[in-house]
Amino acid sequence: MIEPEPLQLIGQTEVRFRRRTLVYFSGCDYFRLSRAPQLAAATRAALAECGLSVAASRRTTGNHVLYEKLERELARFFGAETAVLLPDGYLAGLAVTQALAGEFTHALLDEFAHGALADAARMLACPVKTFTHRDADDLARGLAKCGPSARPLVLTDGMFSHDGSVAPLRAYLKILPSSGMILVDDAHGAGILGRTGRGALEYAGVSRSRVIQCATLSKAFGAYGGVVLASRALQKKILTHSRVFVGTTPLPLPLAGAALASLKILRNEPGRRKKLFQNLTWLRTDMQAAGWNILETPGPIIRLPDLSAAATSALKARLLVAGIYPPFLKYPGASAGGIFRFVISSEHRPAQLAKLAGVLAAFKNS
């Protein structure tokens, strides 16, 4: 892998790239809370009061009161029985599958699932099979092959980061046997989807009875860390059997303070989510009027159709001329050849959205 060129964030919606300041439609800080003064103030306060690190596992002497407070607030925000905090979002699913190893006979993984779930599935000590992306019928065929006595675990993203689409959790639950469960990596959906931002489960209108939700605090929440929204029984298993939980130092205390501040903002300022989806709707509508065939996915992400190498180079050049950083990315499986993926935030200004829309309209009609 070639290391990408460095970017320096400037304000909330721009980056410094090759000595230029460009409008930024990438990253997953959907509300730009990582730049919010409330989070900066909370970080400084926690640093001054608590220090930088507990320098110990939570199973030994590192179970600081700030972590327990954050877990209570996360459980309250998501409407879960408990929450288990992890040092990083990638580790949340691993903590779950380490805790549940041996309890499932089969793992069925969405073919475009995040690598964190692919790694987590390996911890289950059972066969792992993939099913067609977001295809309940193909999942049903896979479940049927597992046999009548199977105890399957389905692993899927909540919201997929390559295009903003969402797993059809309600359809999955209808075909899942009573002995099965679903593990949802809701890194991108948490804080975004659903009436109150509780994520993919709220968006789908499903209960937690057979669904385990994992999330990260580094995207919509603008902070850092991972979390498993769990039953008390699963919480106990993670604290006892997960090496990821038992053997790691938890996230720095100032970041726990920042996460608490972000939860308060998202609870008390629903206007941020309203503005986010207003921006998304405006840009998507303008692009469709210009002739772009783009999916209307629930997430604040706009993926362009695949382009040829020549068209890709031409669009990159046009974006740079217009003062926009070209968000061209490669996702294993979902877009191995690379795609343009524009991530919309609540903080993008109308003029910035209009500039992007103008470039894309001119390119489409050239």
Image (spheres, rainbow, N blue to C red):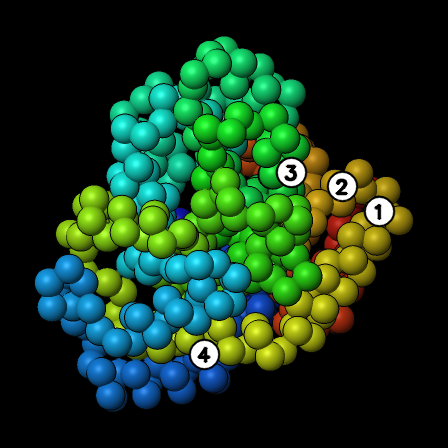
Q: Secondary structure at mark 4?
A: helix
**Residue ID at (46%, 12%):** 147
Does 328 sit left or right of 350 as displayed? left
Give how far across and how far down residue 121 sits, in percent: 35, 31
The residue type indicated by label 1 comes to: Gln
The residue type indicated by label 3 comes to: Arg
**Residue 170 numbered tag:** 3
Is residue 2 something that shows in the picture?
Answer: no
Q: Secondary structure at mark 2?
A: loop
Kindly report which numbered mark, 4 or 3, lies closer to the viewer in this rendering.
Answer: 3
Kindly report which numbered mark, 4 or 2, lies closer to the viewer in this rendering.
Answer: 4
Q: Where 9 sits versus 6, above or below?
A: below
Does 68 sit left or right of 169 as displayed? left
Residue 170 vs residue 233, the one in the foreground: 233
Residue wearing tag 4: 261
C-alpha distance separating marks 1 and 4: 37 Å
C-alpha distance separating marks 1 and 2: 7 Å
Q: Where 273 sits versus 310, above or below?
A: below
**Residue ID at (50%, 40%):** 210
